[in-house]
Image (spheres, grey):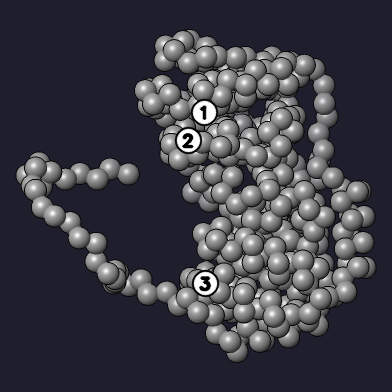
Amino acid sequence: MLIDLPRDVMLEKFTFEYPETVNLRGYNPVHSAHAGQIKRAADIINNSSKPVIIAGGGVTAGNASGELRELARKINSPVATTLMGQGVYPEDDPLSLGMLGIHGTWYANIATSESDCIVIIGSRLSERTTGEASKFAPNAKKIHIDIDPASISKNIKVDVPIVGDVKDAIRKLIPLVKNLNTEEWLRQIKIWKEKHPLRYEQGKEIRVQYVIEKLRELTGGNAIIVTDVGQFQMWTAQFFKFLYPRTHITSGGLGTMGFSIPASIGVATTTKDRPVISLNGNRSFQINFRELATIVLYNLPIKIIIFNDGHIDITRQWQELHWRKPFNEILIDKACPDFMKIAEAYKIYFLQAESSSDVEPVLKKALALRDKPVMIEFKTIYEENVYPYIPLGGSVKDIIEH
C-alpha cells in the first residue's frame, strides 16, 4: 500500500484528537444476531445426526475461536476449515477434518457431502471450497453465519441465514443446542480417516510434504507460517496441522505472489515468542526478495524457506492435468538464480538441502539460530502434484485422491 501525501501536508503541525465514534458511510454492519434465526438454526442442529461445521476466516477475524470450539464439542460435530480459517480449531483434535475444498482432505469433502446439517461460520464458500456449487452437500440443511449479508447465499443457497458478528451468534446458539449423539457419524469419519489419509511417497528426493511435516514436528506447531502462493501453500494447509488462529498467514483467495516476504516482516515485528517462517516458491520469492534489506536492517529472525523445483509449480500442475502438458512459460530451471549468492549479497546466513536426509539437520540448524534471519533452499522433486484434487467444475464424486 502506498500512501502519498503532499509535502506541505507532511510539514504541517497540528494536534490530532481521536474522535469518540467513527462513522463510515456505507459501512454499518449488524453485530447482534437475530434471536429468531438463532432459534431456527438450533432446531435444525438438534434434529441432526450427521452435522459438520465449516469455519472460515471470519472466525479468526471475529476472535471467535474459543466459542467455535465450545460449540463443536457440545454438539459433537466434526469441524472442517477453509484455507483462511485454519487454526481456529486444533487440527490434531479427533473432531478436526482439516481443510475442505479442491485440495482439502478426502474425508473433509466426503463428510460434508454426506452431512445432513452444515453450519457455515465466517466463510464466503468460494468455488475453491465447494467445487461445483449445484452439487455441494445436496442432502444437508445449511445454516450460514456471517457479518456480511452479501456473503450469505452468494454462492450456495442456505436454509437459515444469520447476519451478525460470529462471536455473538455462536454465544447465543450454544445454550440452545443439545449434546448430540453422533457416535455412529464420528465412527464412520474415523474409518474414512484411516482408509483415506493424506499420503506421499518418501524417497531420496526432497518432497515439500516431508519438509512441512518436519517443520511441524520440530516446532510442535508453535510457529507462525507465512505462505506465498503455490503448491507448497496447499501442502502447508494439508500437513502442518495448525493449532491456533493467526498462525497460518496467507493471501488466500487473492493468490498474491510475492506476499510472504513482506508479510513475514510485519509478523516478525510483533512476534517474539514464536518462530516466524516464510515459505516461498522459486518464482514467488523473486517478486519481493529486495525486502531482504529490511529484514537485515532490523535483524528480524525470519526463517526464509525457498522450495526450488525448477518450475512455476502449481501452473505446471494445471497445465499437466487440464491442458495435456504444453508447458509454456513455466520451465524456469535454466533462468533460476543462485539463491546462495542472493543470500550472500544481503549477508544472510544460507543453508541448502538436496536430499531428504538433509532436511531435518538443516531445519534444526536454522531454528537454533533464533537471533538472526536464515535463508534455506530445498531442491525439491522436479514434478509433483498436489492431491487430493477436485477438478474445477467437479464435485466430490470427481475427487482424485493420489
Nearer the observer: mark 3 or 2; the answer is 2
Picture disc at residue 165: 3
Estimate how packed mark 2 is, as few (under 14), some (14 to 19) or many (20 or more) residues with alpha carbons within 10 Å. many
Q: Amino acid at mark 2?
A: Ala
Q: How would you rate the neighbour count of disc 3 (Cα within 10 Å): few for under 14, some for 14-19, many for 20 or more?
A: many
Query: Mark 2 and mark 1 in contact (Cβ < 8 Å)?
Result: yes
Residue 321 is situated, as x and y percent measured from the top left of the image, at: 69, 40
Q: Which residue is mark 1?
A: 302
Looking at the image, tell me whether mark 1 or mark 2 is earlier in sequence order. Answer: 2
Residue 183, given in percent of the width and then of the height, sits at 91, 68
Q: Quadrant of the C terminus?
A: top right
Identify whether 70 is placed above or below 172.
above
In terms of depth relative to the viewer, which is nearer, 334 or 253? Answer: 253
Tell me which residue sits at (68%, 46%) in the image.
242
Placement of 357 over or under 402, stated as above or below: above
Question: Could you say whether the residue bearing mark 1 is in a helix, strand or loop?
Answer: loop
Q: Residue at x 66, y 87 (%)?
A: 39
Q: Nearer the viewer, residue 51 or 254?
A: 51
Q: Amino acid at mark 1?
A: Ile
Quarter where residue 169 is shown? bottom right
Tell me if mark 1 has few (under 14), some (14-19) or many (20+) residues whose alpha carbon lies within 10 angstroms of its own. many
Q: In this view of the protein, can residue 131 be seen by the observer? A: no
> Based on the displayed image, in which of its 4 quarters is residue 353 positioned?
top right
Residue identified by numbered label 2: 268
Q: Earlier in the sequence, mark 1 or mark 3?
A: 3
Q: Secondary structure at mark 3?
A: loop
The mark nearer the N terminus, 3 or 2, is 3
Question: Looking at the picture, which amino acid does disc 3 mark?
Answer: Asp
